[in-house]
Image (cartoon, rainbow, N blue to C red):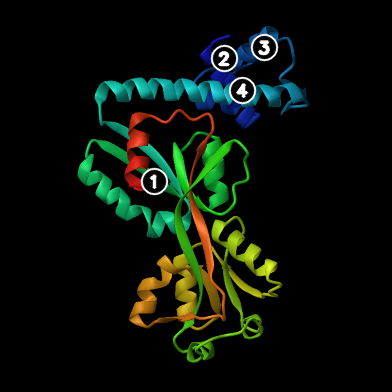
Amino acid sequence: MNLRKLKIFLETANCLNMSQVARNLYISQPSVSQAIYELEESVGVKLFDRIGKKLYLTYEGKVFYQYVRRILNLYIEGTEAIKNSKEGHKGKISIGASTTIGTYILPEYIKKFYENYKEIDISLIIENTSIIEKLIMENKVDFAFVEGNISFKEIIPEPIWKDELIFICSNEHKLSKLEYVTFEQLQEEKLIMREEGSGTRKIIESYLIGLGFKYNVDMELGNTEAILRVVESGLGISCVPFKCAKERINNGSLKKININDISIFRDLYFIYHKDKLISPNMKLFVDFIKE
């Protein structure tokens, strides 16, 4: 068994199409078939079922997949760690971030980090929390910053910031004229929400359901900026992170809706895979954030 065969197995498990694997890895299809055959001989079980022209992972194949992914990830991380230790503060960090954090919080931190460590490149991927979790599981980002609950037990979450969620409306909305608003009044309004899979939406829905709040989702949008624009136009109300709406509240285009005795706070998390080897450069960035 060698790394080449493990890479071929992993790609085959992901694609379930040997022709596609051959194209992806720039090798012949017989080479793919031979590598899988030798791997199955080595471990003593069938890793794939071949039904008609389609491939399916067997139960043993699914179990083996989890370990192969970890082996290859550790190999990549090990070589990167050696490279980074030789080069000092040089290299690349790949960071994932949920939409709110990636748009409104991280850019300022990254800017300040670059001022101190110009030789470290940072790649930032911004998606909703559920997609970022998958990128962590696939080792496509080194670590991430998200809001919301984590679905995978292999991912370690560490609280790193506190965030307040507030209800907002346009400055022309009827609720903007009221000093305080009741839940009954809110329930009559059209609610603009983030899409399914958004960490912000999960937190808001969990909170509202816990209070017995019956809400009417009138519109779902893929990012907070779009929500702010729609609310500004008077098409509904929303609940968003205060950091996102602060500038518009200050300039008067949006109004915070005050609800009697209600405040919504949440934790924002630094997350990473439990098997991830944190390189010196990664630790440098995380420590920078925490300070």
Please name the residue that numbered disc 3 is placed on: 37
Q: Is residue 71 above or below residue 225?
A: above
Label 4 and label 2: CA atoms lie apart by: 14 Å
Tag on residue 5? 2
**Would residue 45 appear left or right of 219 to someone viewing this image?**
right
Please name the residue that numbered disc 4 is placed on: 67
Please name the residue that numbered disc 1 is placed on: 124
Disc 4 marks a residue whose amino acid type is Tyr
Q: Nearer the viewer, mark 2 or mark 3?
A: 2
Q: State the residue lying farthest toward the front.
A: 261
Which residue appears at 55% of the width and 80% of the height?
259
Disc 2 marks a residue whose amino acid type is Lys
Asked whether disc 1 touches disc 3, contact meaning CB atoms under 8 Å apart, the reply is: no
Label 1 and label 2: CA atoms lie apart by: 31 Å
Q: Residues within 10 Å of mark 1 (few under 14, many from 20)?
A: some
Q: Position of residue 251 (x, y in %)?
A: 33, 80
Q: Position of residue 249 (x, y in %)?
A: 39, 78
Q: Is residue 251 above or below residue 287?
A: below
Which residue appears at 56% of the width and 77% of the height?
261
Q: Earlier in the sequence, mark 2 or mark 3?
A: 2
